[in-house]
Image: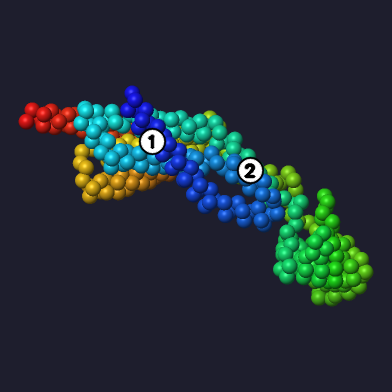
Amino acid sequence: MILNWYVFRQTLNNVFISTCVFVGIIWLSQSFKTIKLIINKGAGISDFFILSAYSFPSWLLIALPFGTLAGCMISYLKLENDKEILVMKSVGLSPLRLSYPAFFVSTLASLILFTISHFILPKTYKNFKILQNEIRNSSQNLILKDNTFIDINKNQTIFIGKFKKNNILEEIFIQDRTDPLYMVEFFAKSGFLTLKENITLSMKDGTRVSTDIKGKSTILNFQKYNIKIKNTERSKSDAYNRVVEYNEYSFFELINKSKNFKKNEGKFLAEAHSRNTIVFMPFVFSCIVMLTILKAGFSRIFSVYRKTSAIGLIFIVQSIVLIIKNLVHSNTLLLPIMYLFPLMIIIMCILLLSKNGQSFKLQSSYKETT
């Protein structure tokens, strides 16, 4: 019991650290898109952290299985290098018995994955998509840059020579194509923006040029002129009209969708049951690691070979899992394989670990008799 707790504590710490590292890598890779969205739409830094918090459960679904893999491998390789595994085996502990701490950690990781995939992910991912959509369709902020032509919408283009503090502008050019019969262009020396419900640009000392479809132009000089700028053509109600992704549905909602939309039945069923099969992945990964580390042989060359083969085998298993999921999209009869494949790997690994343990005991008893 004390020995199991010792190995369990080390493995749990390494799994936690490894998972944090994987989450950090995913965060860095995904942050570039979020930062670009925040900058282009003029949102605040708080929105960036809120979006990251909403994305955290989906990142954890990816990071936790691989964090379990890395944590178990680090812990047991350290035990192997310190010859502690050799000592444990010499006192009669089988490889299966030595695997118990890793299996306990994997079970804990599986429970966390089950909770996230079924209860947390649908809510947080939905909130993430809603906030992301609101930022994309926000009409309250107008992003202007010096010496750059900016298409505010399909019908209005603006150029600002200098953008100063307090929304003061200089050297303004606007092309307005709202009226299909006339193209209107504005040139002004200065102006300022009023940001309220409607964005209004007040221009001073400028010229208005109106050109009809025949090319005839009318020129009007003005001292003051106000023009309303539409930053987006979408209404508030349109901002919420978006495509709902699979991660926003719960397990039972996906099952009901598969019954109501027979055309996409396979996709809904595959996504729904992947919420269950992902729970097996920490256990599958830890079983493969235990099998490659705890089997007999302590040669350094053979140890490097086992590490490489373990990582390669895990990526092959992960690839097959994804292939099976994609096959279910077109053929729902393959759905049971999503469960049978990981369960088969777990059972095979446990049987091999048990067999290795018996052979080791026979070798030990043989050495004692000689």
- Report the residue that reaches farthest toward the left: 370
Image position, residue 364 (x, y; %): 15, 31
Q: Quadrant of residue 174?
A: bottom right
Residue at (48, 32) in percent of width and height: 112
The answer to whether marks 1 and 2 mark residues whose Cβ atoms lie closer than 8 Å is: no
Q: Provide the residue designation for mark 2.
A: 50
Is label 1 in a helix, a strand or a loop?
helix
Is label 2 in a helix, a strand or a loop?
helix
Name the quarter where the N terminus is drawn: top left
Image position, residue 70 (x, y; %): 38, 42
Q: Nearer the viewer, residue 85 or 71?
A: 85
Image position, residue 213 (x, y; %): 80, 71
Q: Provide the residue designation for mark 1.
A: 11
Residue at (57, 43) in percent of width and height: 55
Q: Which mark is residue 305?
A: none
- Judge whether residue 127 can be spotted in this image: yes
Residue at (25, 31) in percent of width and height: 88
Q: Quadrant of residue 338?
A: top left
